[in-house]
Amino acid sequence: MIRRAMVLAAGRGTRLAPLTDTTPKPLVPVAGRPLLEYILEFLRAGGIADVVVNLHHLGERITDHLGDGARFGLRVRYSWEQNILDTGGGIKHAAPLLAGEPFVVMNGDSLLELRLEDVIARHEATRALATMVVRADPSGRYPAVELDADDRVRRVAGRPADVGGRLRPFMFPGLHVFAPSIFDWMGDEDVFSITGSTYPKLLAADAPVYGFVTDARWITIDTPSALADADRELRAAPFRF
């Protein structure tokens, strides 16, 4: 059972300014509570005990709110970034707190209504190096994650380009699971995207990367309109994990 997770929470949330000038995006209220609290509940319900949160913009607000995590039934530790390192760089920077065990990573500005245990079980059953949760994207707004008939991820955002066979496009809502060896696929750079840099390397090498397809409800707070939608969604029907 996977017991460790990381929440990506270092970003500035510029599209939510001026709200995020004084409040870090993960602490923005949704239906009366900071989104980050829902995220911790989701992780705890999925069997996670140890959470790493990366920090930069207004990070002390997050540490003051979460403390050591005990009141959420978790152990929370922090990975401070002097400069924002993007998703891949943030994960790599937190390696001293994550390495040696498989772990979950999720964005600090979005949430899915599903059972994390089911995602972890699929990851373990396929012996994947990485598992990406994916869902349909009727809007076409997000870069495509393309799966083959066996739910192997074959292309992310058009990379690698030379992929044959019929593929199905999905979007990536910000939840994935990694084997400890994921760090072996990260280069020497400090600032890089996990989807833009690491995943293309994995796919070009035919490493075992799988998709977990879901139609679960999903919210994000990446824009003011998305925040308003998320607030209405959770007030009308709270997520259940």
Image: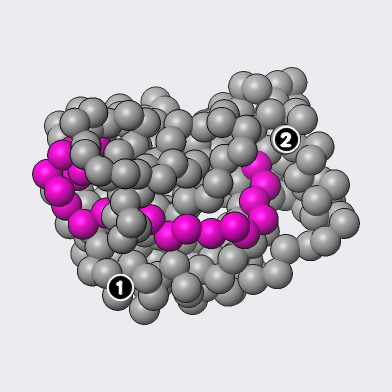
Q: Are marks 1 and 2 in contact (CB under 8 Å)?
A: no
In the depicted structure, whether residue 162 falls above or below residue 133: above
Of the pair 241 and 148, the residue shown nearer to us:
148
Say left or right for 236 vs 129. right
Binning the other alpha carbons within 10 Å of mark 1 as few (below 14), some (14 to 19) or many (20 upward) gives some
SS at mark 1 in the image: helix
Q: Position of residue 110 (x, y in %)?
A: 60, 46
Say left or right for 31 vs 100. right
Q: Find the magenta span and give its range.
A: 198-220
Of the pair 142 and 112, the residue shown nearer to us:
142
Residue at 41 percent of width and 45 percent of height: 168
Residue marked by disc 2: 226
In the depicted structure, whether residue 128 falls above or below residue 26: below
Residue marked by disc 1: 124
Looking at the rendered structure, the kind of residue marked 2 is Ala
In the depicted structure, whether residue 4 falls above or below residue 95: below
Q: Is residue 140 magenta?
A: no
Say left or right for 121 vs 30. left
Residue 66 numbered mark, or none: none
Residue at 61 percent of width and 38 percent of height: 138
Binning the other alpha carbons within 10 Å of mark 2 as few (below 14), some (14 to 19) or many (20 upward) gives some
Q: Is residue 207 magenta?
A: yes
Residue at 72 percent of width and 41 percent of height: 28
Q: Position of residue 71 (x, y in %)?
A: 64, 69
Of the pair 40 and 121, the residue shown nearer to us:
121
Residue at 45 percent of width and 31 percent of height: 143
